[in-house]
Image (tube, grey):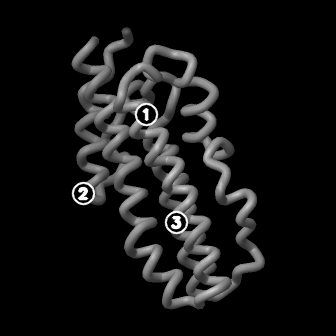
Amino acid sequence: MKEVPMGLLDWLQNWLRGGSAAGLSEQERRFQGLDIPEVLEAHRAWRRRLEEAVERCQIEELDLSVIVRDDQCRLGQWIYLEAARTTLALHPEFARLREAHRRFHLAAARVVQALRLQGQAAALALLAGEFDQCSKEIVQSLAELVQKEQSLG
């Protein structure tokens, strides 16, 4: 197994407290072919886009059939196409990451559905509650998977 740089685990734990990707080398950014800061920034950007759409009540730009697909974004592609074919898939931490990521996409779809059916206040409540929790679970699960790999390395 490849050794995971300790800097990545520290960074992930810092990310959970609102940190940034500053200070990571190119090698430290990567875990089993995944650029973790890039993926997490993409998810953060998606959250901002979703928040902006909810705040402007612009539901027409949010396609539920795309949002609900957890295999289309970069993290989903890594989970289902790359990591699933490695020994990472044998770890319970990997299963937790896959499930957290699936719930993230479902929560995003629920935000859009709430905006359409119940209005802005309901959608904002889901963003601050369930969606936010799912986002944190992805990072926590990823940190646990990185830590597991480090302990085996």
Q: Nearer the viewer, residue 78 or 5?
A: 78
Counting residues from the start of the chain, the first of labels 2 and 3 encountered is: 2
Residue holding disc 1: 95
Q: Secondary structure at mark 3?
A: helix
Residue 131, given in percent of the width and then of the height, sits at 45, 66
Please determine whether, in this image, residue 122 is positioned above or below residue 80: below
Judged by depth in the image, the label closer to the viewer, 1 or 2, is: 1
Residue holding disc 2: 17
Q: Amino acid at mark 3?
A: Arg
Q: Amino acid at mark 1?
A: Ala
> At 43% across and 33% down in the image, what residue appears?
95
Circles 3 and 1: CB atoms closer than 8 Å: no
Q: Secondary structure at mark 1?
A: helix
In the rendered view of the protein, which quadrant contains the N terminus?
A: top left
Residue 63, given in percent of the width and then of the height, sits at 74, 66
> At 57% across and 17% down in the image, what residue appears?
85
Taking the image as shown, residue 63 lies to the left or right of residue 118, namely right
Mark 1 is surrounded, within 10 Å at the Cα level, by few (under 14), some (14 to 19) or many (20 or more) other residues, namely some
Q: Quadrant of residue 76?
A: top right
Query: What distance separates the C-alpha of mark 1 from that of mark 2?
Result: 23 Å
Q: Nearer the viewer, residue 141 or 33?
A: 141
Query: What distance separates the C-alpha of mark 3 from that of mark 1?
Result: 23 Å
Residue holding disc 3: 47
Please determine whether, in this image, residue 14 is positioned above or below residue 125: above
Judged by depth in the image, the label closer to the viewer, 3 or 1, is: 1
Please determine whether, in this image, residue 130 is positioned above or below residue 2: below
